């Protein structure tokens, strides 16, 4: 079959002599620096403003976040199980760049992050102690309430976040590997708005929105990591109590390690740290599984996944419409925050998974990206959260409850409060602190690389000074968020930044569908031409050169000149060949005309 002709690579967005795309870098720098300066000048006013923004967005757009997160899962399923799922993300001759196991391992690395460490114990316990209003009204028994707590946690970390990443990742993978475009978000919309607009003001606006969202999204994660590292040090008795200045020192120290990782190069920095973290995370899970309630964890994990799948549709579309103010507050703290957080991270993760997926089909990409990381997170929360829930329900001898008398859970310290009561608790706490710190470093390092790519118009090897700038910018932004209101400010910012990018994601879905449909139609045409060519060669349809050159009349004359026996042989041969084709292909190539009455 004839291969699709090569698409000429688009020229990169023009960069200045210092390597940056001015209309992307400087607007982003102004927004980030302006936010940090405004927070330093008037933190109370910024805190009030952030609260007002949160109230407005949650009141008016929480349904939009719920609808989009659900719709993106349906979009991914529609692509994956349609004929578009057979389209390869790359040229026809491209084999997958990574083996299947290596690819899964990289997806696992992308799925792990500070958020999993921060919420691994906190979220299931909080949903158990303070369930969402619709669950609280049911007044369930502790076992059933624990089941709902894990199912709600699985919802926030399961298929939806990875479907959000797929929307961006598959659009970028198609642009990068199929059409030879640069590593910039703007090119994902080329099938919809055209190359001229992509390289002009529209493209600059798209990249600015994606870049600002990535900066604030990474800063959100770093803020969570810092507060947890501080809580872990308090658990060990290293520092006495919560103190913003101590958190700023932690940011400064960890940022120094990030700069070392950035300047040392991927092979010496990132890979080394990523391998350490993979071993630490796996070792932590394995130890808790063995030292904790092993049989309970095994049964709970299987049952919780089943409960989540059984109730996924209703949970995915629950916008707390009938829960009043309490429902709106719960949405702002949990579901709306998560959907916004994932969307703000989507450019970062999307570029990463697109980069490693050359040679995969659309179906492989969707199934691999949505299923493998989701299963990893189910295991993570099933072991960490399941252990915490078991201890809270059974209260074994010597165990001190992590849930306060008023039902509160210390989101920063809950993980360490559970770990320190397990065998070798002190060692586990130290391991968790190191895990959070390395996640901080790797997230900031890889995030600075993606941000630098976007700021340079798609340069795969941006200059170090640009990466250093974004490393320092995200560190300063994380510090500003802590000053402006801590976790509440972090959550509000994630929700806010995701709003404009969510519109771009909807456009990405349209552009991706349009591009893949074009690929399918072209593949059908090539298969039809190949079939006709094969039949022509096999049954002598090209034996008369005049018929080929002169068009239908010469062909008709040629056909009429054949003997009836030869005509019958050709017709029978073509009919037999057609019967061997799949019915769908046969009906498409040889459509039946309706008989006239």
Image (cartoon, helix red, strand yellow):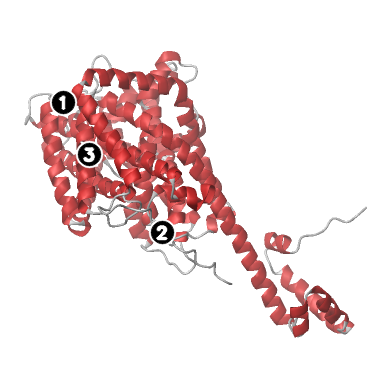
The Cα–Cα distance between marks 2 and 3, rounded to whole angstroms, is 29 Å
Q: Is residue 218 left or right of residue 168?
A: left
Q: In the image, residue 468 lies at what x, y percent?
A: 19, 47
- Most foreground residue, 293 or 9: 9
The Cα–Cα distance between marks 1 and 3, rounded to whole angstroms, is 45 Å
Number of other residues with Cα within 10 Å of mark 3, as a class: few under 14, some 14 to 19, many 20 or more: many
Q: Which residue matches tag 1?
A: 398
- First in sequence: mark 1 or mark 3? 1
Q: Residue at x 22, y 39 (%)?
A: 473
Q: Nearer the viewer, mark 2 or mark 1?
A: 2
- Most foreground residue, 143 or 248: 248
- First in sequence: mark 2 or mark 1? 2
The Cα–Cα distance between marks 2 and 1, rounded to whole angstroms, is 66 Å
Q: Which residue matches tag 2?
A: 11
Number of other residues with Cα within 10 Å of mark 2, as a class: few under 14, some 14 to 19, many 20 or more: few
Q: In the image, residue 193 lies at what x, y percent?
A: 52, 47
Secondary element at tag 1: loop
């Amino acid at each position: 079959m004839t291969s699709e002709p090569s698409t000429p690579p688009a020229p990169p967005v023009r960069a200045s002599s210092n390597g940056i795309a001015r209309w992307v870098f400087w607007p982003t720098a102004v927004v980030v620096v302006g936010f940090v300066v405004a927070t330093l000048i008037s933190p109370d006013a910024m805190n009030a403003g952030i609260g007002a923004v949160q109230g407005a967005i949650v009141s008016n757009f929480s349904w939009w976040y719920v609808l989009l997160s659900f719709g993106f899962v349906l979009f991914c399923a529609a692509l994956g199980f349609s004929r578009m799922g057979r389209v390869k993300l790359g040229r026809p001759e491209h084999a997958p760049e990574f083996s299947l196991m290596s690819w899964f391992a990289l997806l696992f690395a992308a799925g792990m992050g500070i958020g999993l460490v921060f919420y691994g114990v906190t979220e299931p316990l909080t949903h158990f102690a303070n369930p969402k209003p619709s669950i609280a009204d049911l007044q369930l028994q502790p076992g059933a309430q624990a089941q709902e707590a894990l199912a709600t946690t699985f919802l926030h970390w399961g298929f939806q976040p990875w479907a959000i990443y797929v929307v961006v990742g598959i659009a970028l993978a198609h642009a990068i590997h199929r059409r030879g475009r640069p590593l910039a978000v703007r090119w994902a919309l080329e099938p919809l708005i055209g190359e001229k607009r992509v390289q002009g003001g529209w493209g600059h606006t798209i990249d600015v929105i994606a870049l600002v969202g990535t900066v604030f999204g990474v800063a959100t994660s770093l803020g969570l990591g810092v507060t947890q590292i501080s809580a872990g040090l308090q658990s060990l008795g290293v520092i006495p109590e919560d103190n913003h200045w101590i958190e700023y020192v932690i940011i400064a120290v960890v940022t120094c390690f990030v700069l070392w990782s950035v300047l040392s190069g991927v092979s010496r920095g990132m890979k080394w740290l990523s391998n350490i973290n993979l071993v630490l995370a796996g070792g932590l899970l394995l130890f808790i599984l063995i030292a904790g309630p092993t049989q309970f964890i095994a049964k709970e994990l299987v049952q919780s996944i089943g409960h989540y799948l059984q109730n996924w549709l209703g949970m995915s579309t629950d916008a707390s419409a009938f829960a009043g103010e309490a429902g709106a507050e719960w949405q702002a703290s949990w579901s709306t925050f998560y959907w916004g957080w994932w969307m703000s991270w989507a450019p970062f993760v999307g570029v990463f998974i697109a980069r490693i997926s050359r040679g995969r089909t659309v179906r492989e990409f969707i199934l691999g990206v949505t299923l493998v990381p989701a299963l990893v997170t189910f295991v993570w929360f099933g072991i960490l959260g399941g252990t915490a829930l078991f201890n809270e329900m059974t209260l074994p001898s010597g165990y001190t409850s992590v849930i306060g008398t008023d039902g509160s859970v210390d989101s920063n310290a809950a993980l360490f409060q559970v770990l320190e009561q397990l065998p070798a608790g002190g060692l586990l706490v130290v391991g968790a602190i190191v895990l959070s710190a390395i996640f901080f470093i790797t997230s900031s390092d890889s995030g600075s690389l993606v941000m630098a790519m976007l700021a340079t118009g798609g340069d795969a090897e941006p200059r170090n000074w640009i990466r250093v700038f974004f490393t320092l910018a995200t560190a300063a932004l994380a510090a500003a968020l802590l000053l402006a209101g801590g976790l509440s400010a972090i959550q509000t910012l994630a929700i806010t930044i995701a709003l404009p990018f969510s519109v771009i994601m909807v456009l990405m879905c349209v552009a991706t569908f349009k591009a893949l449909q074009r690929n399918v139609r072209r593949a059908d045409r090539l298969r039809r031409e190949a079939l006709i060519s094969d039949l022509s060669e096999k049954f002598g349809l090209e034996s008369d050169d005049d018929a080929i050159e002169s068009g239908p009349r010469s062909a008709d004359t040629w056909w009429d000149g054949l003997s009836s026996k030869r005509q019958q042989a050709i017709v029978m041969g073509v009919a037999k060949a057609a019967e061997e084709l799949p019915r769908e292909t046969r009906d498409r190539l040889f459509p039946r005309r309706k008989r006239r009455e």
